[in-house]
Image: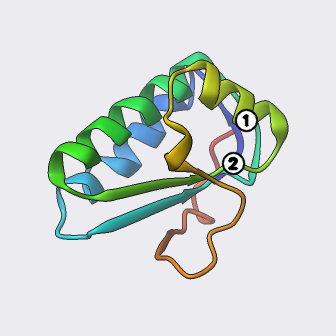
Amino acid sequence: MRGEVDAATAPDLDELLAPRLVSKVRSLVIDLSRVRFLGAAGVHVLVRAALRAEHQGMSFRLVTGPRCVERALRAGGIRVEHLHASADGVVTLRADDIRLA
């Protein structure tokens, strides 16, 4: 994922995540390292996704990237154990073909 995740693009993120949150995948890592702005609507989608993943017994992790993204996630209530500096060693959701900007 790259660019901006705001009120205009958050529905795209939600649509991207929805099928993965009902799949048999046991671990989901979302790489936000190339996101340069994460607005409240994007944070809301990610908080809901984290709760759905937890309900499904799925491991849910976010690669935070820029400080502004990490600050937005923390302010939005994402639990610290969901935040990581790197996606090494885990399955990563790749959305390079979808530009959220």
Secondary structure under the numbered disc 2 in the rendered image: loop
Relative to the observer, which residue lies in front, 61 or 17? 61
Pointer 2 or 1: first along the chain = 2
Q: Which mark is residue 44?
A: none
Outermost front residue: 81
Residue 58 position within the rendered picture, expressed as x and y whole percent measured from the top left? 26, 58
The residue that appears at 46% across and 23% down in the rendered structure is: 44
The residue that appears at 54% across and 28% down in the rendered structure is: 42
Q: Which mark is residue 69?
A: 1
Residue flagged by tag 1: what amino acid is it?
Val
Instruction: Look at mark 2 in the image and give the residue it sits on.
Output: 64
Task: Say left or right for 40 vs 55.
Answer: right
**Badge 1 density bin: few <14, some 14–19, many ≥20, Cα 10 Å:** many
Task: Say left or right for 51 vs 91.
Answer: left
Secondary structure under the numbered disc 1 in the rendered image: helix
Residue flagged by tag 2: what amino acid is it?
Thr
Position above or below: 72 against 22: above
Q: Residue 14 sits in which quadrant?
A: top left
Q: Quadrant of the N terminus?
A: bottom right
Q: How is the image coloured?
A: rainbow
State if disc 1 and disc 2 touch (CB < 8 Å): yes
C-alpha distance separating marks 2 and 1: 6 Å
Q: Quadrant of the C terminus?
A: top right
Position above or below: 99 against 72: below
Q: Residue 63 sits in which quadrant?
A: bottom right
